[in-house]
Image (cartoon, rainbow, N blue to C red):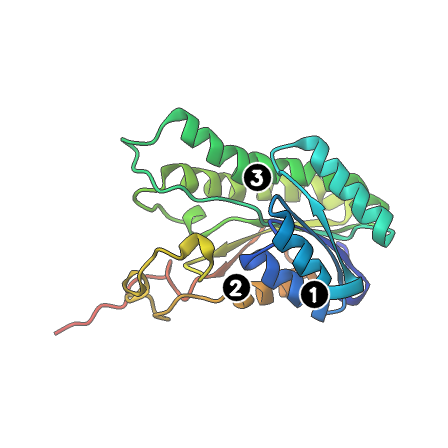
Amino acid sequence: MSRFTLSDAVVLISGGARGIGAATARRLVADGAKVVIADILDEPGQALAAELGAQATYHHLDVTDAQQWQSAVAHAEKTFGKLNALFNNAGIAVFNDIESETAQGFQKVIDINLLGVFLGLKAVIEPLKRASGGVIVNMSSTAGLQGYAGLSAYVASKWAVRGLTKAAALDLAPHGIRVLSIHPGPIRTPMTSAMPDEAVAAQPIARFGEPEEVADMVSFMMSQATFSTGSEFVVDGGAVTGQVLALK
């Protein structure tokens, strides 16, 4: 399996303009990596790249478009000379219970959260081979470990990302490419802005996580977890462990 230090790595981050993606870009640059911030949010993505300086660049990317993935990968190699890692981070959550969910709404979530991850995997295989191996971190969720009411499409997509990660890890191991999934719980991002604090009150760590805490895990997975592939890394305040109940 590939062993590289982040100080010598080039990392492509989908959904990199804000939230967990932006926090990870900042963390990896602090670790010495060069990052390609890829997103459909051009203005904040360009602003973040300007903030991070010569170690960062921005490229427009709709993750459901295979040609745009190829363009983003080509941009990474042209700008920085190689590509070592992918953080397959872009995703959406749409709240609908199973009765009100539509086929069109379900498909949109699957296209971004699952097809987008698949297309990203496909796009980086040859560049990572050229770099003599590397690592792919796929964004799943605690919704890839358990169910959530009102999130049928999201839950389905995140369980699928977990399974895809394992299949890809087996296929790509002979090429020195590790593939891992990360499973955040409630993290304070634009996606969870409407969730009240009471939503996390029964967790062992009874607060929302911060994007920087997920970024720390991504950094670890890429640079330190060199004997892990196909594995789940959970960042959730203990949410999937169970609930802390006050017994009277």
Q: What element carries label 1?
A: helix
The answer to whether residue 213 is seen in the rendering is yes
Q: Quadrant of residue 29?
A: bottom right
Q: Give the mark nearer the N terminus: 2 vs 3.
A: 3
For the point 47% across and 39% down, the residue is 157
User: Residue at the location (79% across, 48% down)?
Assistant: 76
Callout in the foreground (2, 1): 1
Q: Percent x, y for residue 53? A: 76, 65
Mark 1 highlights which residue? 51
Residue under numbered circle 2: 211
- Residue at image location 53% in from the left, 68% down from the top: 213
Classify 10 Å Cα crowding around label 2: few (below 14), some (14-19), many (20 and above). Answer: many
Furthest residue in direction front, as rendered: 43
Mark 2 is on which residue type?
A: Pro
Q: Which amino acid does label 1 sit on?
A: Glu
Q: Earlier in the sequence, mark 2 or mark 1?
A: 1
Provide the secondary structure element on which disc 2 rests: helix
Q: Would you name the residue on which mark 3 appears?
A: 164
> Marks 2 and 1: CB-CB under 8 Å?
no
Give the position of the C terminus as an image quadrant. bottom left
Alpha carbons under labels 2 and 1: distance apart: 18 Å
